[in-house]
Amino acid sequence: MTDSPRGPEAATYLAEVRRHLADLPPAAREDLLADLEAHLNEVAADLEPGATLAGRLGSPQDYAAELRETVFVEGDAPRAAPPRNPLAAARAAAVRTADRITGSAGMGTFAEFREKVRPGWWVLRGATAGVLLCYLVLRADPAFARASVGHFAATFWAVAAVALLGTWASLRLGTASTRWRPGYRYALAAGGTLVVLWAVWSAVDAVGLRAYLVQYPDAYASGVDENPYGGISDVYPYDEDGELLTDVYLLDEWGMPIYLGDPSYCAGGDPLNDSRSDPYGPDPDLGYQYPLCVPGSSNESAAPSESASEAPTDEAGGSPTTPEEGPSDPSDEPTTTQDPTTE
Amino acid sequence: MDRSQLLKGLLDIIVLRVLADEDAYGYEILHRLRKAGFEELGDATVYGTLRRLFKAGHLSTYVMPSDAGPHRKYYALTATGRTHLRGMREAWEDVSTKMRALLDPPEKG
């Protein structure tokens, strides 16, 4: 009914009146306003040239006040009647607060705001479902996924097409659902929320998967789905002179500690120093100090040569124990030594 | 003095009576009221009263195209509307008689 040239003026006036009735119970307000647009258009069409709707009818605020007084003349619903049970009261208070927030943002009542946002939600829900579907398909078949990564452009357009299809289907579903019973609509809303949450979870998961694929390119393809360094129990770093480095921290490219092995369990040996068996665990910023265990205390300890493993003995001059005491017997009181003076 | 409060209780009977002889659309109803001297009744009041009477089943509506501008919604009295008008009118006559007697007591003689 906005086919008259005065349409926009009537629409603006109506929006103002609606704003001034925002505190009414939604049902009562919508009932009041249901016909008002047509009526205002009628009035606007009858206006003399040069006259304005506000000039003819008074300010929207006064109009709203008059309307309110007239309709509730018999006191059937002067205001939103205070709800009887506390749950309904809390709900009404929440709606009032939401109305105030959306109203102050210039979006009308919360119900109006929700109406405006709803198609956006449908688009988000549908596109997300489409992308999620693609992801699940790729995820299900690693070989197909690897092939798809090779044809990036084709994969991109295919995913976009599926997402578009999902959006269309979601919009169809959304418009159809406005005629559904509330129970079905709630189920649909819950389903949509679940899809989006699932997608977010999958995205987080996928970032991890990508990092995994980059780190171990062959592992995923060959189906070996485990850390190739999982069997390692300790790390022995050596410098270019073949000398064993101690008190070494390993950090990844993000500065996160790399934890390998178990400091509380040294095969055939003892923890190198007290800090490694500290009950509070390793330094959260730096992680374990490597090597974790006394090198040579077990038979298969990694030592490239005799000289190399002896080298740290000389380096550990600051140790309170005498270097000569160490090499005497590997199993002799290793707990008293504060550095790898064995072999 | 502001008569709108005084007229509030009479809105139903006023609007129903204006529509009793001939159907009309919103703006036309307002014109008839103006002609009858009810200057203080605003558009919102009349529109609100129409909505309320329609909801109560006293009025029915139909849409007619107009020569210029949008379609017009015409209001017509229903059977219950006529009954309501009759009842209201009886009440008004009663109150009116008593009011007149109260304000201008008949000379005792």
Image: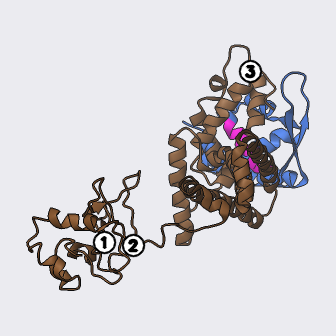
Q: Which chain is in blue here?
A: B
Report, in whole angstroms, how far the alpha carbon at label 1 lies from the one at label 2: 8 Å
Give the amino acid type for the residue marked by disc 2 in the picture: Gly
Please state the chain letter of the residue tagged with numbered disc 1 in the rendered image.
Answer: A
What is the number of the mark on residue A261?
A: 2
Determine the CA span between mark 3 and mark 1.
91 Å
Name the residue tied to disc 1. Answer: A292
Amino acid type shown at disc 1: Leu
The residues colored magenta run B44-54
Q: Percent position (x, y) of residue A48?
A: 74, 16
Which secondary structure lies at badge 1? Answer: loop
Q: Examine the structure image and report whether residue A152 is included in the region drawn in magenta.
A: no
Q: Chain of mark 2?
A: A
- Residues at marks 1 and 2 touching, judged by CB atoms closer than 8 Å: yes
What kind of element bears circle 2? Answer: loop
Callout 3: residue from which chain?
A: A
Query: In this rendering, is residue A11 above or below A270?
Result: above
Label 1 neighbourhood size at 10 Å, few (<14), some (14-19), many (20+)? Answer: many
Label 3 environment density (alpha carbons within 10 Å; few <14, some 14–19, many ≥20): some
Q: Earlier in the sequence, mark 3 or mark 1?
A: 3
Does the segment drawn in magenta span residue B49?
Answer: yes
The answer to which of marks 1 and 2 sits earlier in the sequence is: 2
